[in-house]
Amino acid sequence: MLFEADDEQAYIKSVKLEMDEMFTDINKSNIYFVKKSVRKILKITNKFIKYSGKKPTEVELLIHFCVKLKTYEDMFAQSLSMQNIYSRQIQKIKTTLNGLHEDLQFDYMNELKPLL
């Protein structure tokens, strides 16, 4: 984070790449392992969000998390806890969006619509 303090977009890009890598490493043999891995990815993502401390970064990373999580739609049917994780993150994005500038709200809402 220290090296990317001047360039927030580079920080977001590097975190997204790390998230993509973690999602590809998920063990899909059992729903338990998928849930455990998703919770771990969310925990790490929240840690990176706290490091940044900026609301647009939080929204962008959480939207990316939800997009990646949406690829496991077949697991949603099997697990209520996966649905709850997804819905909590969508609610968190909506709450954070309310504190942003109107132009940013519009842009991020366009990204959020396919996830709803």
Image: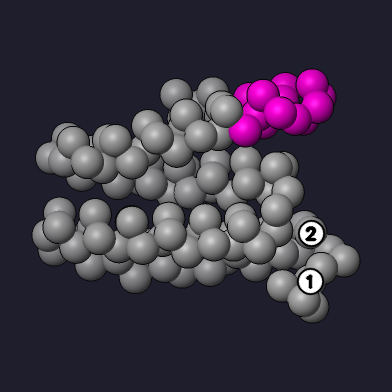
Q: Position of residue 53 (x, y in %)?
A: 70, 53
Q: Residue 4 carries which label?
A: 1
Q: Position of residue 64 (x, y in %)?
A: 54, 47
Relative horizontal placement of residue 13, taking residue 3 as reference (left or right): left
Q: Which amino acid does label 2 sit on?
A: Glu
- The image quadrant that residue 100 belongs to is top right
Residue, disc 2 = 8
Q: What residue is drawn where x is 52% and y is 56%?
A: 46
Please tell me whether residue 77 is drawn above or below residue 15 in the rendered image: above
- The image quadrant that residue 60 belongs to is top right
Please tell me whether residue 107 is drawn above or below residue 53 in the rendered image: above
* Residue range corresponding to the magenta coloring: 96-111
Judge whether residue 41 is colored magenta. Answer: no
Determine whether label 1 and label 2 are within 8 Å by CB.
yes
Q: What residue is drawn where x is 13% and y is 40%?
A: 78
Q: What residue type is labelled 1?
A: Glu
Relative horizontal placement of residue 42, taking residue 48 as reference (left or right): left
Please tell me whether residue 104 is drawn above or below residue 23 in the rendered image: above
**Majority SS type along the magenta span:** helix
Q: How far apart are marks 1 and 2 (CA)?
A: 7 Å
Q: Position of residue 77 (x, y in %)?
A: 17, 35
